Amino acid sequence: MKEYALFLGCNIPIRYPSTEIATRKVFEEFGISLVDMKGYTCCPDPVVTRLADPEMSYVLSARNLCLAEEKGVDIMTVCNGCDESLLEANEILKKDADLKNRVNEVLSDFGREYKGTIDVKHSVEVLHEDVGVSKIKDTVSSLGFKAAIHYGCHLFRTKEEDEDPWTRPNMMKAVVEATGVELVEYGLEKLCCGYPALLPDPELALNERLLPKLKSIGKVGAKCVVLSCPACMIQFESGQVKLKDAGVERLPIIHVLELLGLSMGMTGEELHLEFHRSPAMDLAKEVGV
Amino acid sequence: MSSLLGKLEKALKGQAKSVSSTKDRRYRVTVDSENIVNGAKILFDDFKSRFMTATCVDEGLDFSILYHFDIGGEVVTLGTSIPKEDPRLQSISLAVPTAQWIEREITDLFGVKFEGHPQPEELIAAEGWAEETPPLQKPREGNIVPEYRGAIENVISTGAVVSLSSFTKRKRQEAGLAPTTITIEDEEGRDELHKILKRSKVDERAGFDWKKKKLRYK
């Protein structure tokens, strides 16, 4: 059985336990074992912490990578931000011997050593590569409604071995389509949701990033928005509330793993979709699960 | 190694945090604030130095107080750091009488209180003028921009960028989830995190107050 160290990050266990439930249930169903990482920290986040203190960012990422190395398994992420932080730190630390030495000098005091022996994969990649689209299709009941996809900026981050920024977004698209959802194009798929600008410039984050997306999505008849990042989920869900007077419909926002859970017959109550600030539970009821 | 550097290291052993040569004929001795008078006495009495002047530098969160001594044409700077929240330092003026005026000037301009000063009165400021707002004291500021301070406080104190409320803990339990394994709920991991952050001086760079679990600036 394929095994991964499950890196949930901060926002999923704290803001979206429903995504944690979906992650555990869906991968169990697909026969992929997830090992919890005891005592992990924030990835740390690729915007705030990295800008504030890059050295701290590398030390904490390396420690998280160590926790998985000690178990001898690759990391699976469920959040685009965590994915970028860990993926990038892993790539940089493998190449930059000076940085690796500095980081290990700190970690060695705590009996840890970053070796660079594991890889970091987003759950979308695990679904696409380890589970496979055909197995997903064989497992699920087709949902058959229209949905808009939001990939999230960090999913476009390329890996060293593949420089095509669309590789992972296309994987996500294939996984979503495997649930029988009809994806409707709205033309602003690549536009940032605005989450990283939320702290320094909330006006821009809301009115120049999220609002145009929601307006475009509203025009194409999507029943919900599917994404792969809890930070984007926060921005979409709280943003819709803040923009309630802007004339946009309040849509259900769900993580791709929650969508998979629904397509596998899990109910909204079972997934605890009540953690969402959007009508995700209503979507589950509407599709009959 | 120059002969003076070796002598300084030997004489200040047990008193100084560091002794170094910064450039030709310039030396820097750094001490904890409680050792400032002893350090000054050693430089002034044992090395027969001439006290030149002192400098106060507003570093944002702390003041650096630097006393400069001339030892046979070479300059030795004795420095320490004090927090701006409580800017007090033992005066060296009883041991080094010529430091009296410069310490009073620093008090006037930066608000640093030199305890045990023999004449703690204004020197260049009018009486009572600079007590509330010392003219050269800058607002207390650190490296983290205002928008990111909350997130950084969370990461340093708990290891998570967001905080976990008791409501969410209860809701997680009701949903059948185990406590999270992130350091916010894993005490052993959090303890290691704190030691790592101290070891790599992240707390110093950010200006984090461990007692208050907050940054030292708003």
Image (cartoon, coloured by chain):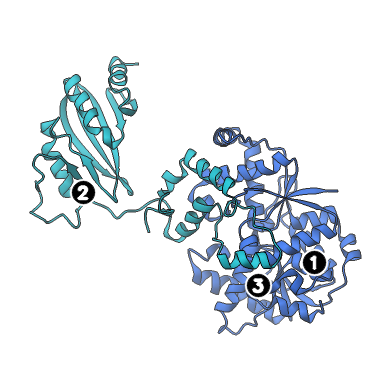
Chain colours: A blue, B cyan
Do discs 1 and 3 belong to a common subunit?
A: yes
A116 or A214, nearer to the observer:
A116
Residues packed near mark 2 inside 10 Å, few (<14), some (14 to 19) or many (20 plus): many
Q: Mark 1 highlights which residue?
A: A260
Residues packed near mark 3 inside 10 Å, few (<14), some (14 to 19) or many (20 plus): many
Q: Amino acid at mark 2?
A: Phe
Q: Mark 3 highlights which residue?
A: A276
Q: Mark 2 highlights which residue?
A: B110
Q: Amino acid at mark 3?
A: His
Residues packed near mark 1 inside 10 Å, few (<14), some (14 to 19) or many (20 plus): many
Residue A192 in view in this figure: no
In the picture, the quarter occupied by the C terminus of chain B is bottom left
Q: Is residue A272 left or right of residue A41?
A: right
Q: Residue at x 86, y 57 (%)?
A: A132
Do discs 2 and 1 belong to a common subunit?
A: no
Gap between marks 1 and 3, in whole Å? 16 Å
**Residue A94 screen position, x and y as percent:** 66, 37
Q: Is residue B190 left or right of residue B203?
A: right
